[in-house]
Image: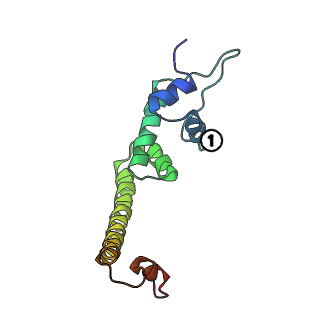
Amino acid sequence: MPGMTIGALAKAGGVNVETIRYYQRRGLLAEPERPAGSVRRYGPEAAGRLAFIWRAQELGFTLEEVRALLELAETPNCRGARRLAANKLVLVETRIRDLDRMRRALRSLVRQCDAGGARSCPIIDSLAAPDH
């Protein structure tokens, strides 16, 4: 019997069986018919779609954005995919700036702590300050 069981698909995709079921409930991955007296079998297209979903999530796309990308892949529509990617890039760059700001603040607090001499903890004081 050709195809993979859900367990084999999960193993091939490096995900849990419940992840595949979740994707199916969300409409991202089709659930094949169950032949009478047998188990569902997934073809190579399911493995490819699972890999697509996984790679898109690694780039930070939400499942709704993944759905949109999957729909765009059907046509294919590079302009729409580019728009989604450009929007995601703006969010990533904003997050990087925010993380860099957080890193600088934390470095400063750790240096203050390392310098010693303070009667109280500069980290705790900073967090407890009403203007933050």
Residue 121 in percent (x, y) is at 42, 79
In the figure, residue 51 lies in which quadrant?
A: top left
Residue 29 in percent (x, y) is at 54, 36
- Relative to 68, residue 87 above or below: below
The residue lying furthest to the bottom in this view is 131
Residue 5 in percent (x, y) is at 56, 22
Which one is nearer the viewer's eye here, 13 or 100? 100
Horizontal side of residue 54 vs 20, given as left or right? left
Query: What quarter of the picture does the C terminus occupy?
Result: bottom left
Residue 24 in percent (x, y) is at 59, 38
Amino acid beneath label 1: Arg
Horizontal side of residue 56 vs 112, given as left or right? right
Q: Is residue 75 visible?
A: no
Which one is nearer the viewer's eye here, 51 or 127? 127
- Residue lying at 49% horizontally and 87% vertically, measured from the top left: 130
Which one is nearer the viewer's eye here, 70 or 102? 102
Element type at marker 1?
helix
Q: Is residue 72 visible?
A: yes
- Relative to 37, residue 33 above or below: below
Query: What quarter of the picture does the N terminus occupy?
Result: top right
Q: Residues within 10 Å of mark 1 (few under 14, many from 20)?
A: few
- Relative to 24, residue 100 above or below: below
Q: Which residue is mark 1?
A: 25
